[in-house]
Amino acid sequence: MAEKTLYERLGGAYAIATAVDYLIERLQTNATINNMNPKVAAFHTNQYKAGYKFMVTAFVIEATGGPKCYPGKDMFGAHKHLGLTDYEFDVTTHEIRNTLYQLGVPRAEVVEFMDLVETTRDAVLTRA
C-alpha cells in the first residue's frame, strides 16, 4: 500500500478547512502583524475573510498532496503587494504551528507541514 499523503494524514479537506478557519482568526487578530504592516491590516478586514479562508484552504489542500483546486496566483504574485518581512513570516509560522498543535495534529505532520511552509518563504517575501 502506498504511503498516505500529508493531505490524508492531516485529515483531508474538512480537517484542513477547520485548521485554516482557526488560523485565519488568529492572524486577523494578531496585533504584531497587523500593527507592523498597514497593508496586512487592511487585507485582514472582514470583507476579505471568506475569500481568504477559501484561498488558503485550497492552497493547503493542493500543496499537501490533495486534489488540484487552488485557483489563485503563485505565492510571489499573491503577496508582492504586501511588502512582507522575515519577521512577519516568522510570526505567521508561529501562528500556524500553534494552530496545528492546538488542533491535535501529531508532531511529525506539524514538522512536515512547517517544512513545506518554509519552502514558500522567498516567494512570499518576493525574493524569488
Image (spheres, rainbow, N blue to C red):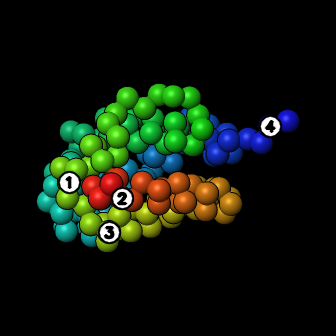
How far is disc 4 from disc 2 in space, using C-alphas? Answer: 32 Å
Mark 3 packing: few (<14 Cα in 10 Å), some, or many (20+)?
A: few
- The residue under the point 52% across, 36% down is 62
Q: Is residue 11 visible?
A: no
Picture coordinates of residue 43, whole percent (x, y) = 21, 48
Q: Amino acid at mark 2?
A: Asp
Mark 3 touching mark 2, by CB under 8 A? no
Q: Which residue is mark 3?
A: 86
- The residue under the point 55% across, 60% down is 115
Secondary structure, mark 2, is helix
Picture coordinates of residue 52, whole percent (x, y) = 32, 40
Q: Amino acid at mark 4?
A: Ala
- The residue under the point 21% across, 39% down is 47
Instruction: Give the quadrant of the N terminus.
Output: top right
Secondary structure, mark 3, is helix
How far is disc 1 from disc 2 in space, using C-alphas? Answer: 14 Å
Q: Which residue is mark 4?
A: 2
Mark 1 packing: few (<14 Cα in 10 Å), some, or many (20+)?
A: some
Q: Amino acid at mark 3?
A: Asp
Picture coordinates of residue 102, whole percent (x, y) = 56, 61
Q: Earlier in the sequence, mark 1 or mark 4?
A: 4
Is label 3 or label 2 in front?
Answer: 2
Question: Image height check: is 86 above or below 53?
Answer: below
Mark 2 packing: few (<14 Cα in 10 Å), some, or many (20+)?
A: few
Is label 4 or label 2 in front?
Answer: 2
Q: Quadrant of residue 57?
A: top left
Instruction: Give the quadrant of the C terminus.
Output: bottom left
